[in-house]
Amino acid sequence: MTATHPLVEEVAQQPSRDPHTAISAIAEAHTLAARFAEGSSLRDRERILPVAEVDALSASGLLALTVPVEYGGPGLGAAVLAEVVRLVATGDPNIAQIPHSHFVYVNAVLEQGTEEQKRFLLGEVVAGKRFGNAQSEIGSKHVRDHATTLRRDAAVNGDWVLDGEKGYCTGALFAHWIPVLAHLGEGGPLHVAWVERHADGVTVIDDWNGLGQRTTASGTVRLAGVRVAADRITPYHLTFERPQAYGSFAQLLHAAIDAGIARAALRDAATFVTTRSRPYPDAIALYDVDGAAEDPLIVRAFGEIELQVRGAEALLAEAGRAVDRARADLTAESAAEASLAVAAARAATTAASLEASSRLFEVAGTRSALASDNLDRHWRNARTHTLHDPAAWKVQHLGRFAIDGTLPPLHGQI
């Protein structure tokens, strides 16, 4: 697909706009979510990558939401972004996940970038460019263990050469820039190397074969002798040597994706029950119902799912506000409160997405299990995405805080 796709043309031909406000960003996300939903099942079934849809997301201006006003963006906060991501995920959670690292690495530039780096890289974002990621390493001991290293460039004094292999590189295939997490020198501190997607030595491999989130293209990035100028390297480790909301911001967006999956599953269950499900004979005999949607047991089940999804959405919204409060006045206490609020949201959205996507079949009945309807994609998406960070550890940190006030760790995964 190219920029001539009708979806991209429609967004691109809109009149030139000022930077988004919170109201316009949410309205735009509503519109795009409805369009993305139309082809989400087919894309999942046939594993059609959403190239045009991601281009439309870029053209909408939503990927620049968190760029500060002084760098040409609208400077909107985490709470607005979380709602935008949640809405996009109700249309297609694959599309919502693809720019996750984009927003996180915009944050990385703001946290530790030089003024020149901020002006250049954030200018790229305002111009519609996308950041991917090359962070995790599949062969490592754990998710925070990295072997990829920047070594001195023997040919250019002061510059560096990058070698390594990264996995789970969501967004890299669609990116213009790939931020690579690497040690600066052998065993040195972690830094971000800003590498152009098509630079010499960069290979992005679409080898992702997950059972869910099938079209995120979260595959492998190989780096072989990639030259990196000194002014395209940003410290990463320094962010975690003080109170920070970097990790809670990243986790918040994961929670937003799960909340969107939960709402989409509930929506599709309601559509199926009101249009295709048959009532159970006992419901006809005892309550004289005309359709499955009138069965009191089904109505109660929908009420229970709705309650759980609403609770998760409310915790997500409060977590977004907590992250914004922390970023406005960053202290050990405000950073901890943001992490705990996001931990609660992540635990709740994990449960809600799995429950709603599973109980979909309970309320919709036998017909909903037909492979042709592909309703199992909601559960597959939820189960796959919620594996990013175990919800049990979110609950663990909440429990320690409730017992004795222990603050969560600063490693950036809570």
Image (cartoon, rainbow, N blue to C red):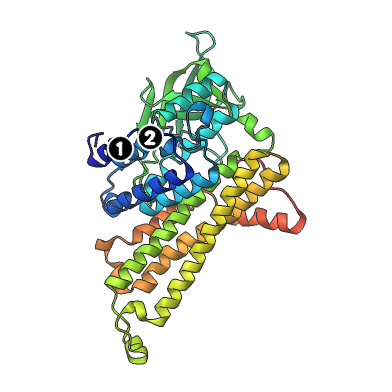
Quarter holding the N terminus is: top left
Instruction: Say what secondary structure mark 2 lies in.
Output: loop
Residue at 44% in and 74% down: 301
Q: State how many labels appear.
A: 2
* Structural crowding at the residue carrying mark 2, measured as other residues with C-alpha within 10 Å and reported as few (<14), some (14–19) or many (≥20): few
Residue at 31% in and 87% down: 281
What type is the residue that disc 2 sits on?
Arg
**Residue 14 tag number:** 1
- Pointer 2 and pointer 1: residues touching (CB < 8 Å)? yes
On the image, the x and y values in percent for residue 22 come to: 48, 44
Residue at 32% in and 39% down: 56
Q: Is residue 270 left or right of residue 413?
A: left
User: Which residue has dot 2 on it?
Assistant: 17
Residue 411 visible in the snapshot: no
What type is the residue that disc 1 sits on?
Gln
> Label 2, label 1: how many angstroms apart (C-alpha)?
8 Å
Residue at 33% in and 89% down: 288
Instruction: Say what secondary structure mark 1 lies in.
Output: loop
On the image, the x and y values in percent for residue 19 come to: 44, 35
Write down the quadrant of residue 347 in the picture: bottom right
Residue 123 visible in the snapshot: yes
- From this view, report whether residue 195 is shown above or below residue 398: above
